Image (cartoon, rainbow, N blue to C red):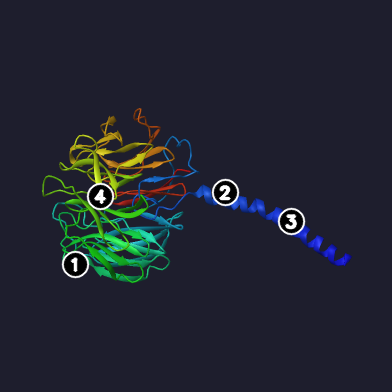
Amino acid sequence: MKESAKKRQDTGALQNLAVCLCLPLCILIVSVLSSRGADWPQLLGPNRNGSVSETNLAKAWPKDGPPVVWQKGVGPGFAGPVVSGGRLVLFHRSGNFEIVECLDTETGQRFWSANYPATYKDDHGFEEGPRATPTVRQQRVFTLGADGVFNCWALDSGKKLWSIDCGKDFGVGKGFFGIACSPLVEGDTVLLNVGGKGSSIVAFDVQTGKVRWKAGDDEASYSSPVAATIGGKRYAFFLTRKQFTGINPADGKVLFEFPWTPNIQASVSAATPVVIDDKVFISASYGAGAALLQVTDAGVKKIWSADEVLSNHYATSVHHNGFLYGFDGRQESGCKLRCVEAATGKVKWSEEGLVAGTLMVVNGELLILTEKGELIRAPASPEKFKPDARAQILPFGVRPYPALANGLYYARSREKLVCVSLK
């Protein structure tokens, strides 16, 4: 009995020693993982709102700007890069093919590449590459081409899992500037603003691509949807051609429709709705303007609206601590970067000279990428616009949304994809 007790004591001591030895290692692993930050698997980042937290970013940039880790040539298109699990997905065009490439995030080396014939021809002098940023979920890559070909690919191998021709299957045309809706994965479905009669909004099965439900008759806009839970109810929010629509993503039931459209036919609504607690900020140019709407069980209630506040042409505004930051005005006329109090629509400051661009909020700071290829860092402050740092990272002609993951910033122009380190 004494010998058995001694064995138990020895075993317990060894177990305690193992725990003591493993604990620092576990803490180190958790620390490394938490410092890496989140992936950027879809348009506007992990939360689809342009806001992300990264704990390993440098407080200051080198004199010559953040170092370039790698870069590569790309083909035409406005689809931004996305990042998941150490893999970057690039969607662009070469000749008569739309191309999906999977690259190593650290080196830019290619894991795989896939392509299919592209038929889109632009009528207005713009690029003919894909417009919609891909989405990565459940080890699958979802891409929507400029002419409406919707594909699902295996992230690990590039194998095509299913394909749908939205133009053919739903009877929709290319509109003014092609098809631009970035897919939204919601549970086991992926949602698109297709724009067909009886199929304005369509939910597809993630695994098979089969249609789960269809809703609405409105044409498609160039905006991408976002999902949120408000008052215990799940919503998917869409800006279609003529209205702001709230829909139950589980069954396609239309919960409300709020009229919202530019004043002229030759126009686009491209910015994604921004969810702020129980409210949603919507914005478009061409005379539509901006509005803050409160979502209730009965539908939506307008808090304020105006066309002199923050009318987004194509880039979605971001929200931080009660204030919206974004570009107001038409790109071809020169936009103003603005800070607006979300609750009231009051303009706090306005900055000219940046032309146009996209922006994200990272740890309370704005990262602004202008169409001129300049990366600007500034505090997200309603007091004034005061940049901390500026760096030219790309040539002129930057419209696609960038991505930030694990301290690496990925951005593309018409001809180049660059990875710079902000660590």
Q: Nearer the viewer, mark 2 or mark 1?
A: 1
Q: CA distance from mark 4 to mark 3?
A: 58 Å
The location of residue 369, given as percent across then percent down, is 33, 42
Please tell me which of labels 4 and 3 falls first in the chain: 3
Q: Residues within 10 Å of mark 1 (few under 14, many from 20)?
A: some
The location of residue 317, given as percent across then percent down, is 30, 42
Secondary structure under the numbered disc 1 in the rendered image: helix
| Residue at numbered disc 3 | 16
The answer to whether the residue labelled 3 contacts the one labelled 1, judged by CB atoms less than 8 Å apart, is no
Q: CA distance from mark 2 to mark 4?
A: 44 Å
| Residue at numbered disc 4 | 299
Q: CA distance from mark 4 to mark 1?
A: 28 Å
Please tell me which of labels 2 and 4 falls first in the chain: 2
Q: Nearer the viewer, mark 3 or mark 2?
A: 3
Q: Is residue 332 visible?
A: yes
Instruction: Give, as a three-letter code, the residue at label 2.
Output: Ser
Location of residue 112 (image quadrant) = bottom left
Q: Residues within 10 Å of mark 3 (few under 14, many from 20)?
A: few
The location of residue 95, given as percent across then percent down, is 24, 62
Instruction: Give, as a three-letter code, the residue at label 4.
Output: Gly
| Residue at numbered disc 2 | 31
Q: Is residue 399 above or below residue 174?
A: above
Secondary structure under the numbered disc 2 in the rendered image: helix
Q: Is residue 368 visible?
A: no
Q: Which mark is residue 170?
A: 1
Q: Residues within 10 Å of mark 2 (few under 14, many from 20)?
A: few
Instruction: Give, as a three-letter code, the residue at label 3.
Output: Asn
